[in-house]
Image: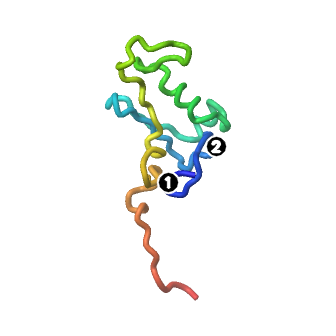
Amino acid sequence: MLRDGTAMVRRLSEFPWVLVRVDCPLCPHRRGQYRLARLANEYGADIQLCDLLDRIAHDCPRRSLPWEYPSDQYDPKCKARFTDLEAISPPPPDLPPTMRKLTVIQGGKD
């Protein structure tokens, strides 16, 4: 469980939104969004999110392989992440802005 009471998302099949957004706080030009269905079709729905992130950010110049030692311990490493899973209370990125703040209307048909 996370701080806000939601379950930890470990696999692509558990991802809560239709859009999967990825960014890196170190590289402002490295950000993107992918359709969940396309990622599931290409990599499989049961892929671990850490493995998916490795595949998406495979060409990052700051990314190192697990068996490689960094040349400089102070050199910043790749910080690629799933944007909406890192936020404290993320709004669903696949909802239009007008639907993000839904209100209950009293009354209606009986």
Q: Are dots 2 and 1 in contact, CB under 8 Å?
A: no
Q: Position of residue 24 (x, y in %)?
A: 39, 32
Q: Of discs 2 and 1, which sits in the foreground?
A: 1
Q: Position of residue 82 (x, y in %)?
A: 47, 39
Amino acid type shown at disc 2 = Ser
Q: Which residue is mark 2?
A: 13
Q: Position of residue 47 (x, y in %)?
A: 64, 34
Tag 2 secondary structure? helix
Picture residue at 66% right of the left edge, 33% below the top = 44
Q: Could you say which disc has been placed on residue 3 in the image?
A: 1
Residue 35 is left or right of residue 99, and the answer is right
The residue at the far bottom in this view is: 110
Q: Position of residue 33 (x, y in %)?
A: 45, 38
Q: Quadrant of residue 41?
A: top right
Picture residue at 67% right of the left edge, 37% below the top = 46
Amino acid type shown at disc 1 = Arg
**Pointer 1: residues within 10 angstroms few (<14), some, or many (20+)?**
few
Separation of residues labelled 2 and 1 (CA atoms): 21 Å
Query: Is residue 98 shown above or below 73?
Result: below
Question: Viewer-proximal residue, 107 or 55?
Answer: 55
The residue at the far left in this view is: 28
